[in-house]
Image (cartoon, rainbow, N blue to C red):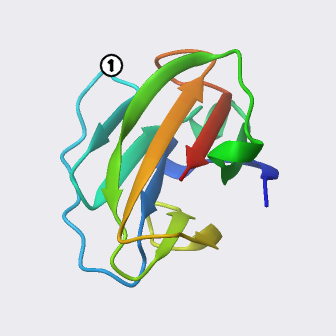
Amino acid sequence: MMRKISIAAEYAQVVILDPTAKVEVPLWKRDVPCVASDTCILCGCLHEQFGDTEITFGPAAEITCDLTVVFDGVLKTPGRKIAMESVWADPILDAPTAGIETRVRIWSNRSVFPDKVVIAYG
């Protein structure tokens, strides 16, 4: 099910991962929209002091988007679960996945500090 939320993203990032798996958190790079390992994606957002980021999170079959693609890759999901968390590992949203690897696509309205982010999985 597709969900839409607005959050003040601490450190201007959200984390996408399988919360049941051991993850390798990638090192953040300056002026990029996302960085990823095969088990974790860090997605840039608007810095919390400047306001909320509107995030849409849902299955690829339910997502239509006219924003710019900033990430298209595969995330290992051995527990068949995908989640979005804060940088402090606080759960935000989660969903089951069909397999142990899940395609993830991310769009945003700006490459740096976007206030609209769309995350599609599956």
Residue 18, relative to residue 61: is it above or below? below
- Determine the residue positioned at 33% across, 78% down: 78
Q: Residue 30: x and y, percent? A: 27, 25
Q: Residue 93: x and y, percent? A: 66, 66
Residue 30, relative to residue 78: is it above or below? above
Q: Residue 101: x and y, percent? A: 35, 62
Give the left or right position of residue 46, taking residue 78 as reference: right
In terms of depth relative to the viewer, which is nearer, 95 or 113? 95
Q: Residue 87: x and y, percent? A: 44, 60
Q: Secondary structure at mark 1?
A: loop
In terms of depth relative to the viewer, which is nearer, 1 or 85? 1
Q: Where is the N terminus found, in terms of image quarters?
A: bottom right
- Determine the residue positioned at 24% across, 79% down: 22
Picture quadrant where residue 60 is located: top right
Residue under circle 1?
31
Q: Judge the density around disc 1: few (<14), some (14-19), many (≥20) Cα neighbours within 10 Å.
A: few
Picture quadrant where residue 65 is located: top right
Give the left or right position of residue 35, taking residue 2 as reference: left
In terms of depth relative to the viewer, which is nearer, 120 or 4? 120
Picture quadrant where residue 72 is located: top left
Residue 89, relative to residue 106: is it above or below? below
Kindly identify the amino acid type of the residue bearing the numbered disc 1. Answer: Asp
